[in-house]
Amino acid sequence: MPKTVAVMGLGYVGLPVACLVAKKGFKTHGLELNPRVVDQVNQGKSHIRDPALIKAVKAVKGKLLATGDAGLALSGADIVLVCVPTPVTQDKHPDLGFVESACRTLARHLRKGMLVVIESTVYPGVTDEIVKPLLEQSGLRAGKDFGLVHCPERIDPGNQEFALENIPRVVGGVDEHSTTEAVKFYRKILAASVTPLNSIKAAEAVKIMENTFRDVNIAFINEIAMSFDKLGIDVLEVIKGCSTKPFGFMPFYPGPGVGGTCIPKDPYYLIERAREKGFEHRFVSLARSLNNAMPVYAVSLVEQLLASLGKPVETAHLALLGLSYKADVDDVRESPALEILRLLSAKNKSLKAFDPFVPGKSNVRSLEEAVQGADCVLLATNHRSFVKSLSPRQLKAWNVKAVFDARNALDKEGILAAGIRYKGIGR
Ligand SMILES: NC(=O)c1ccc[n+]([C@@H]2O[C@H](COP(=O)([O-])OP(=O)(O)OC[C@H]3O[C@@H](n4cnc5c(N)ncnc54)[C@H](O)[C@@H]3O)[C@@H](O)[C@H]2O)c1
């Protein structure tokens, strides 16, 4: 059994993986560029505000050694998991700079017998065409001297039901031996299935396809919701009805847009790769633009709601609740709530924004301070604590005039019965 594992990048993906590997008894090194993260992890502290991760990092204090020293982290490693970012540029092109730089570093420390696993999300072809040649600059050959596989990470931060350990994985390798070794490794650390695929490209495409699947389905339900707003139909009631069909329907829910580092970004990896090869993804591109336009739509609904109260958006008391991209996480990357904040702040200088997970971007310190006396409360992120606290009775006690529920998470009937105006997306 290989004894030493190195994880490159201790972010939302790498840190949980490193903790799990250390917990399973492997000697574990985490190579991280950010010295603040290195210090925190070595003190048993998580730089990510996720209760499960905070616990996991504490539990492996002294077992997971974080460092910025590539030689220390990599030279003794039997398995290296690459978990560095794969963002898009401002104009939405894949930015593989972190992967390339990590591979150059790794090439300097590559040894015979090592197994390299790319966990970062990449478009089909990156591992074969970019990662492999960079690693082979070491003089060693993939599939002969070292193993190389792609095993896409599917972690869903904040998910209470599925954590890293019980999410099934797929693996595709440069050769059968690499795939078999990687499957063995993941079967040791996971309590979920690990499925070998017959190519690296297939494994790379799995991740891109499943996130594109979500993006187009969310775009579809967002479009339906906008249509139902005109037709006067409650989209949640319709989803409830459709969900009674035991086959051929899967519920997706409308919202103020799509955020995080995966779903709004991964389809662009597919679009660009296919375009290079001569295929234009019209449907996937349309889904992207529909979802990107949702914050503008959300703001237009807020303005309509305020108009019904006779309040101009410029002078209304507004409370924006939630800044992270989804419930119960502190991640604001690509968050539609931030786009809503930007759009509304341009019109309203006294807007109060609050997110208990994102104190650095909040301009008030409590829910009460944000909501008390608001003409319109805008729920952009359905943190459980918000949904629990924003009962019709509490909203009434805080003298709220209107609620825009961009997550369709609050008690619409109760709020209306309390004499407060309510608008959701598609209801
Ligand atoms: N965040 C998610 O929920 C999620 C889920 C599944 C897959 N992914 C994918 O996983 C990958 C990582 O995403 P993330 O959210 O963990 O990113 P992140 O930004 O949270 O973390 C990446 C970390 O890597 C570090 N880093 C960058 N280059 C490095 C290098 N050369 N050596 C060592 N450390 C380096 C950065 O400092 C950062 O701390 C991306 O490809 C992403 O698309 C993310």
Image (cartoon, helix red, strand yellow):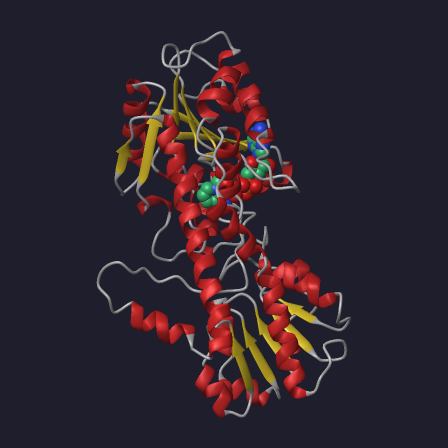
Q: Is residue 177 above or below residue 61?
A: above
Is 188 on the left or on the right of 62, as rendered? Answer: left
Residue 197 coordinates in the image, percent (x, y): 29, 30
Residue 368 falls in image quadrant? bottom right
Q: Nearer the viewer, residue 420 or 46?
A: 420
Q: Position of residue 19 (x, y in %)?
A: 43, 40
Q: Is residue 30 visible?
A: yes
Looking at this rendering, what residue extends furthest in the top direction? Answer: 139
In the rendered view, would you say 332 is above or below 18? below
- Position of residue 239 relative to residue 133, above or below, is below
Name the residue: 25% across, 40% down.
Answer: 193
Nearer to us in this view, 149 or 25:
149
Q: x and y percent of residue 365 in the render? A: 66, 70
Q: Quadrant of residue 22?
A: top left
Left or right position of 157 against 247: right
The reply to whether residue 323 is in sight is no
* Nearer the observer, 18 or 319: 319
Residue drawn at point x = 64 percent, y = 63 percent: 340
The residue drawn where x is 58% and y is 65% is 322
Q: Is residue 113 above or below residue 283?
A: above
Image quarter of the N terminus: top left
Return the x and y of residue 18 as percentages of the image width and height: 44, 37
Q: How many marks?
A: 0
Residue at 33% from the left image edge and 44% from the top image edge? 165
